[in-house]
Amino acid sequence: MTSALRIGIVGLGRLGRRHAENLAFRVPGARLVAAASPSAEERDWAAANLPGVATVPGLPELLARDDVDAVWLVTPTSFHADHVIASLEAGRHVFCEKPLALEVTDCDRVIAVAKARPKQVAMVGFTRRFDPALAEAKRRIAAGELGRIFAIRCSSEDAIDPHGFFVRFAPTSGGIFLDCCIHEIDLVRWILDGAEARTVTAAGTRAMYPGLAPCGDVDTGFATATFDGGCVATFHVTRTSHRGFESMLTVVGTEGALEIGRGLGHLPITVEKDGGRHVGGLVDFFDRFESAFLHGARAFVEAVREGRPSPLGLEDARAATALAVRMREALVVAE
């Protein structure tokens, strides 16, 4: 493909707007041509902030256009599987925000449709793999700098929401592990080269949001998974952080350890090796994962334009959903 990839985005909430601005202004080879939302306020935002971009009320209207090569889905998770399938069946390439679906059976439906259309690129937005700090960590691990990996610790903390806005969406979110820990799950599997989890345990509590009780969800969760090859990974996820957002990952091997994400505003990798601590700075330019969103978008566009496979396959997305579902099913709530 020599011309720009013409993209239509569906969903213009907080995250959708970030994707839309990247596609409109920051991704070489991409041209945002249309934006869909059932919200008049969101369509008005698009009209005011995305010059030359047409607005429509939903995915059907977007797919009816003849100037859309690829669909960018930033819709609620409960819609993901059906929206990806509709887009693929309409002959479009698809980028879908994480996770692929709420259930493994829905992931399988998507994969079956995608396999029948091998020339169309389908990618799920596990864009943290494209974060410079995490990509550098993966390079070091793959090079054997840490030896055999035997422990991984993940932490993802969201700031306290005094209004509890997210509670109304919790019943269709898939639970805290699928909604808030899916990136960490994907990163652990990526670091371990796709190793399968043998055992899973999980516990959690509703410390500040009792409104989660009717759907069985929690605001703070802990999970432990053991993986083929002898690695144990722990996951801590919460919506009750007093210090704001923070995402951290610690990887421990027989020859060293590294930590990604400590500190707000800048993101050093701290490597412990040979009796010392070595800090290498990788600085993001807006907030923690802004560059990861951008690099992921560029990777998708380049794959389509150059006729290459998806930079992140649907099978990985299925595996992440499967592990998150196992955590949800294993969850023991402290009352």
Image (cartoon, helix red, strand yellow):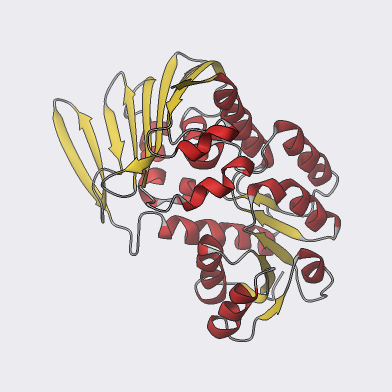
Counting from the top left corner in percent of width and height, residue 69 is at 75, 68
Q: In which quadrant is the C terminus drawn?
A: top left
Q: Is 10 placed above or below 88 here?
A: below
Counting from the top left corner in percent of width and height, residue 155 is at 36, 35
In the image, what residue occupies the spot 85% across and 55% down?
Answer: 89
In the image, what residue occupies the spot 64% across and 47% down?
Answer: 77
Q: Which residue appears farthest toward the left when viewing the image?
A: 276
Q: Is residue 30 left or right of residue 250?
A: right
Q: Is residue 6 left or right of residue 133?
A: right
Is residue 252 at all visible to an observer of this figure? Answer: yes
Q: Is 274 placed above or below 160 here?
A: above
Q: Is 267 placed above or below 36 here?
A: above
Foreground of the two, 146 or 289:
289
Foreground of the two, 51 or 117:
51
Counting from the top left corner in percent of width and height, residue 185 is at 50, 33
Q: Is residue 198 left or right of residue 37?
A: left
In the image, what residue occupies the spot 57% across and 27% down?
Answer: 328
